[in-house]
Structure formats: structure tokens, C-alpha cells
Image (spheres, helix red, strand yellow):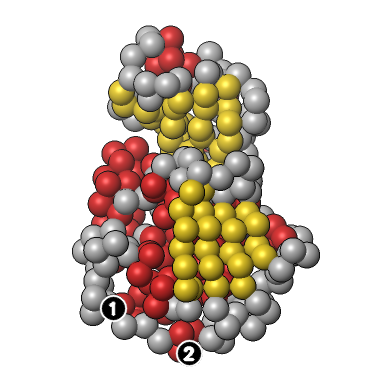
Amino acid sequence: MGGLVFLDLDRLDLADIHDPQRLAKAVHRQIGPLCCAVPVDEIALKLGITEIRQEELDGCEGVLLTDRVRSAGKILVNTGRGPQAARFGIAHELGHFLLERHVLGLSGAFTCSLTDMRETRTARQHERQEGEANAFAIGLLVPDNQLLPFLKEQPEISSAVTMRSSLNISLEAAARCLVDRHAEPIAAVWTKGGKIRYAVRGKSFPWITRSTGDRVSSLSQTSRALGMAKSGTTTMREVPAAAWTSADIPELFEQVRVGKDGHTLTLLWATLPDRGAQDDEED
Ligand SMILES: [Zn+2]
């Protein structure tokens, strides 16, 4: 596994933390600054997980076997979507393990689907728990000291690509993390065969009018890039806002990365109306 032998973690210090981001930060405080990918297996094994199995699974992404008081736990994760998704799965299940208020399923285990691994909602118990496990996983796999340099730069797909290799996380996780934490109003959209798979928005980004299964607008740079049938990443360019949203915004910029397999990742960057300036003009 090639982990860091000096890693010394104390689970007692983490026992009363119920906020997933604070919990991830507390783990990193114990470890100290890292300059490379986070050794998630070793962290899990130091914190009470006794076994991690990685196998190709059908129909679920990860399972945590444990008991109500978390005396010990075993993690099983799917390798079918690649090693980086498996690392995310381990971090996600470790989140369920450490967040002791998370309630086990009827089978006495957490069984997590692909939808669960993307959950961000906070309303119902199941979705809230999955959203918290994901927030913990991102906080654990992307330490603040390694994320901050990217948040100071203009939003760019290349940031997500660099994060993917330096942190050994998926491009999807890296892009979601950027969208979530960047101060600029940005959003990311994943498509396949010209149809939207799903989208994530930063807090200040306006609604994306199009939803899962919809074809991308012919006004979008994504549609144009797909038409050229070449893989690669475009520059960030202005597009008509109507390509993605019906919100009344002054400008919308779009950059797209076309993969070899018909998958694209689109980054959207909005300019929001400056309320103060508008009022001045009207006076
Ligand atoms: Zn889960």
C-alpha cells in the first residue's frame, strides 16, 4: 500500500464532531500538511477500519459493515469506475463510519449507490447522510492547503485536471470541489453523446435551465466542440447566456473538455448583474 508509516491518528479526538467538513479538517490537523495524494487507505485503517476490500461490484459503489457504536468497520468498494472513484468510495464510507449519528440501513450496513456518491441535498435523512459522507470525502481527499492555490486563480478546467493528478482523485470530484469552493459564480455540466448527464452549480450561479437527458443548446460552445469531433479542451469564451440559462445575466463564459468517448466536461462562468451599478444608471 506504500502509506506513510509515521501517520498517527487518534479517533477519540474526532468523536464529537458531527459536521463533515470540520471532521475532515480535524483529521488533517492530526496528520499535518501533505504535499501529495492523501493516503486514504492508511487513514481509514488507523481510525478503526479493520479491512478494505476493492472489487468490481454490480449495482452499488460501496458498503460499510459496522455496528451502531462503531467498535470496528469493514469497507468494500467498487473498482469498476477506476481507482480514483474507489478512493472516493473509501473516503465516503469512512465518513459514514466516523459520523456516528449516521443511522445504519435495515441490513445493518451502509450500502451506497452511484446516486448516493453524488448526493448534496440536505432534506431527508438518507440524502442528508449521503451528502455529509460526500462532503467529508471531498474534505479528506482535497486538503485546504492543496486547494487554496486553485481558488486564487481564474476558474479553468486545467485546475481540475492538475488536481486530479496531484491528489489522485477523479476529474469529476476535482471539478465538483472547484465549483463548490470557488468564489466566482461557476457551474460544471457533464454530458455524453450531446445530452446532459448532470450539472452542479456554485452557490451564486443562476439556474441552469436544461436538465438531465436534455440535448445541449446549439448556442453552446459544448455543441460546437462536439460538432468538430476532436478531443481536447477549448479556451474560456463568451457564449449567449440563453445557451444555458434563462436568467438575465450580463455575460456567460464557457469552456469545454471533450473526451475521446463522447463525454464532455463543461465549465460555465457567469457575470452577475451588479445591482449597485444598475441603480446608478437608472438615476
Ligand atoms: Zn453512503
Q: Residue at x 56, y 86 (%)?
A: 16
Q: Of helix, strand and loop, which one carries label 2? A: helix
Q: Of helix, strand and loop, which one carries label 1? A: loop
Where residue 28 sits: x, y (%)? 35, 75
Front residue of this view, candidates 158 and 152 = 158
Where residue 243 sits: x, y (%)? 54, 23
Where residue 5 sits: x, y (%)? 24, 76
Residue 266 appears in view: yes
62 vs 91, left or right, is right
Front residue of this view, candidates 52 and 208 = 52
Front residue of this view, candidates 256 and 272 = 256
Residue 207 location, quadrant: top right
Residue 276 appears in view: no
Q: Amino acid at mark 2?
A: Leu
Would you call the spot at circle 2 few (<14 residues within 10 Å), some (14-19), or many (20 or more)?
A: few
User: Is the residue under label 2 in contact with that under label 1 (CB below 8 Å)?
Assistant: no
Front residue of this view, candidates 127 and 187 = 127
16 vs 41, left or right, is right
Q: Residue at x 43, y 71 (%)?
A: 44
Where residue 275 sits: x, y (%)? 54, 47
Q: Amino acid at mark 1?
A: Leu
Q: Which residue is mark 1?
A: 7
**Does the beta carbon of the residue at mark 2 sit less than 8 Å from ligand 1?**
no
Q: Which residue is mark 2?
A: 12
Label 1, label 2: how far apart the Cα atoms are:
16 Å
Along the polypeptide, which appears first: circle 1 or circle 2? 1
